[in-house]
Image (spheres, rainbow, N blue to C red):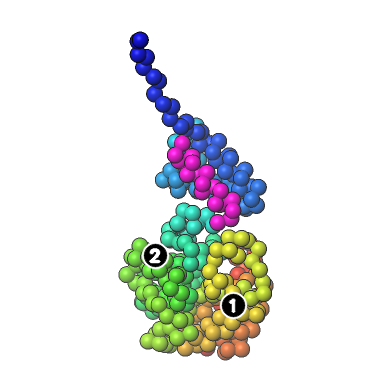
Amino acid sequence: MTSVDQPPASTPASRPLGLVLDEMAALFTDAGILDPRVDAELLAGHVLDLRRGGVQAAAFRGDEVSAADAARLGELAARRAAREPLQHLTGVAHFRHLELAVGPGVFVPRPETEMVAQIAIDALRAAASPAPVAVDLGTGSGAIALALATEVPHARVHAAENSADAYAWTARNFEGVGAANAHLAFTDLASAFPELDGTVTVLVSNPPYVPDAAIPRDPEVRLYDPPQALYGGADGLDVVRVLAEVGLRLVHPGGLIVIEHGELQGEGVRDVLASAGWLATATHRDLTLRDRVTTAVRP
């Protein structure tokens, strides 16, 4: 009997990247995700080690993805459709010019907080001191503090975090960014940095401000952000009250406090600060015209 060579076993077929992106975007649309195509492209970039523009270019050229990469994308897409945060899947959150490591246990920085950082940065740049001091209380991933330290290199920036889970991510980001002018401490914000009393030019914070009885609308927030980074008491302002008092201890006369809050809390935050003795309270809107941050001046 004559032997016959058998054809080689077929390998799983690759798939067009554009088609994979279309399928992911459709899945995300059905799941109620706000920017389905963006999330699809970012997940593809994570798997293929490409920036989003590179993903778009590859899809336009008609490039294909291997069966293994397509399977990996399918797995991640299913998790994203179940509303696991995109940043948990990629391990990265973008904040201003920074790429920060994030994951379970730490609050994922939001684009609206970039405005909070900008106000603090502007105040540091305008300070007369050759080495103004900034403090970020409840720093979480370190987003605000590291933005200040890298964008105002002549400033000295101190950041405090008291959640062990969050602190692991914070320390990783401080080490990764490597800003020599940034100092991180594991400490409660109420007692942080007594050695800086009366020397701080800007105190900034994105505190927990969701009222305890409120239920965040987005599953990514409700199910994945750490509760201690979200909830701030019956009216959401318990930590703001602490910040108002701590700020009087830390900030020098003429210095600034900068606090992020919910869009309906501007008046409440101004009242808290004014009652504590702060001057020139003002609430500022973000790019979506929502009240987002309130500032005040130390008398």
Would residue 21 be found to the left or right of residue 193 on screen? right
How many marks can you see?
A: 2
Identity of the residue furthest to the top in this view: 1
- Binning the other alpha carbons within 10 Å of mark 1 as few (below 14), some (14 to 19) or many (20 upward) gives some
**Number of residues whose C-alpha sits closer than 10 Å to that of mark 2, classed few (under 14), some (14–19) or many (20 or more):** many
- Considering the numbered disc 1 on the image, is that residue within a helix, a strand or a loop? loop
Where is residue 188? Give x, y as percent.
Answer: 45, 81
Mark 2 secondary-structure assignment: helix
Task: Please state if 265 lies on the left or on the right of 149 as rendered.
Answer: right
Relative height, residue 235 to residue 81 (above, below): below
The x, y position of residue 73, in whole percent, is 50, 44
The answer to whether residue 48 of the structure is visible from this angle is yes
Give the residue at x 58% y 89%: 276
State the predominant SS element of the stretch in magenta.
helix
Q: Amino acid at mark 2?
A: Asn
| Viewer-closest of 55 and 79 | 79
Residues shaded magenta: 67-84
Q: Which residue is mark 2?
A: 173
Marks 2 and 1: CB-CB under 8 Å? no
Of 220 and 118, which appears nearest the observer?
220
Looking at the image, which is closer to me, 86 or 295? 86
Q: What residue is at 41 percent from the left and 26 percent from the top?
A: 9
Which residue in the protein does label 1 denote? Answer: 232
